[in-house]
Image (tube, helix red, strand yellow):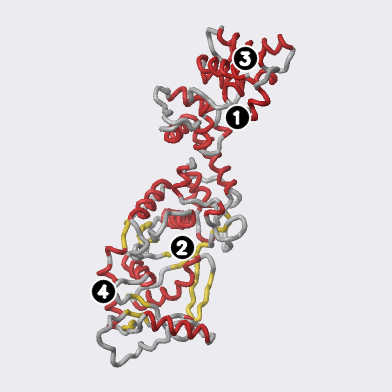
Amino acid sequence: MTETVRVRFAPSPTGHLHLGGARTALFNQLYARHQGGKFILRIEDTDRSRSTEEFIVSILEGLRWLGLDWDEGPFRQTDRFDIYRGYVERLLETGRAYHCYCSAEELEERRKLALAEGRPPKYDGRCRALKSPPSGIAPSVRFKMPQSGQTRINDLIKGEVVFDNAQLDDLIIMRSDGTPTYNFVVVVDDVDMDITHVIRGDDHLNNTPKQAHIYNALGHETPMFAHLPMILGPDKARLSKRHGAEPVLAYRDMGFLPDALVNYLARLGWSHGDQEVFSRPELIEHFALPAVGKSPAVFNPEKLLWLNSEYMRKAGPERLTGLVMPFLQPVGPDGAEGQTLEGVETAWLTRAVSTLIERCRTLKELSSALGYYISEDIAVEPEARKKFLTAKTLPYLKEIREALSGLEDFGKDGIEGVFMETAKRHGAKLGDIAQPVRVAVTGRTVSPGIFDVLEIIGKRKTLMRLESAIDSI
């Protein structure tokens, strides 16, 4: 076995890349980078009935978006069938595998009988020493498992795990149609690719003793195993869509930053002191398998949102402006069809973004909040209209509109002066004047400072929206 650390991520393209798979890929990449090793990507697409090109593209796109770059691959198992057949022949020649002529119907009947009699429904081994194979039947190939003793796996996370060999089945490694099976091709790939460490979810733990015996039968040192605890929902059930978990690319479409999601995934089951926010170099520097917890990690959507907001603040207005642009086209943030950013200056948009950074947790929230800046028309929230656009506030709105229309320099200082004079003239609090204007101009009861907002929205749209509010009262 090579002395260089070589790890692999081997997704099955029967679905999109989800959080659990992304975390497994991340931990493999971090371990490889920390150890100065290699990270190999392998596509386990032998399940032809469920694997699709669409899912392969989606998985690769998800990994690239997260920045989980690989060193070798992607290798596809469907391109390696001749290699698998060669290894099957080797096992047959050495007596570590044998042909099985049992039909699927016969196997099912025996399984039902074993269950009815309270026995484990494992293969009974009747073809193990078959002297006269029947003619006219295409056989499958089974691997000879040891029938006594124990298999001990020194897991880098779980510690020593012991399996009773009497419970192991003589598993099929090649079907009667010539297609290889999962547990066999995984081992062959690991042997061929000199994999030194297998870091994967602990739902694969029960496959480990079977695979360990195949490694040995092929004359290859068993790699080191590290089985990652599952990710659970807040209710401690296995993480699923009902907990708010989505495919990785859905988080991109919801406006999460890849660095934030990577940081969050790294902290799902791994820790380094009390530190919560990590740069990528820090993750590589500190990542170690002994620091991965043995207990399942719990997915917390609110913590992910908090972490994403931290990364948005760190990104700054200029970078966020570029990142939010795709969320603003071709449909405007207020939902108006056909709304585009044509004619919008980047510098102006950056000013608008700078007022909202502290208020938004995702790029999608940011794009929505930018609506009243960018859109020509706005929709006023019904409750806000009912409470603040009334006969009582009408005089304020009219005076503010009149005074603002006379401003030559529509800047923050001039706008503030208009509000202060109006409040003084009416003996009113500044908030009594500002809130109706805020609702009239933004359609909402909450916004950044009203003087900044009006300056950025500009004189024309401000006056137009005030006039529309006045007419509606």
Q: Is residue 431 visible?
A: yes
Camera-near label (3 vs 1) is 1
Please tell me the numbered disc located at residue 129. none
- The residue singled out by tag 2 in the image is 200
Decide which of tag 2 and tag 1 comes sooner along the chain: 2
Q: Is residue 379 above or below residue 254?
A: above
Q: Residues within 10 Å of mark 3 (few under 14, many from 20)?
A: some
Please report the residue visible at 71 percent of the width from the left and 9 percent of the height from the top: 425
Q: Position of residue 65 (x, y in %)?
A: 41, 46
Please report the residue visible at 37 percent of the width from the left and 74 percent of the height from the top: 215
Q: Is residue 10 visible?
A: no
The one of 445 and 84 positioned closer to us in this rendering: 445
**Tag 1's secondary structure?**
loop
- The residue singled out by tag 3 in the image is 416
**Tag 2's secondary structure?**
strand
The one of 129 and 319 positioned closer to us in this rendering: 129
Please report the residue visible at 30 percent of the width from the left and 92 percent of the height from the top: 131
Q: Position of residue 392 (x, y in %)?
A: 70, 17
Quadrant where the C terminus is found in the figure: top right
Q: Residues within 10 Å of mark 4 (few under 14, many from 20)?
A: few
Quadrant where the N terminus is found in the figure: bottom left
Q: CA distance from mark 4 to mark 3?
A: 81 Å
Q: CA distance from mark 2 to mark 4?
A: 27 Å
Q: Position of residue 374 (x, y in %)?
A: 48, 25
Q: Circles 1 and 4: CB distance less than 8 Å?
A: no
**Going by the picture, which residue comes out furthest to the bottom?**
131
Residue type (three-letter) at the residue carrying disc 1: Glu
Q: On the picture, is 326 further left or further right than 393? A: left
- The residue singled out by tag 4 in the image is 86
Q: Circles 2 and 1: CB distance less than 8 Å?
A: no
Q: CA distance from mark 2 to mark 1?
A: 49 Å
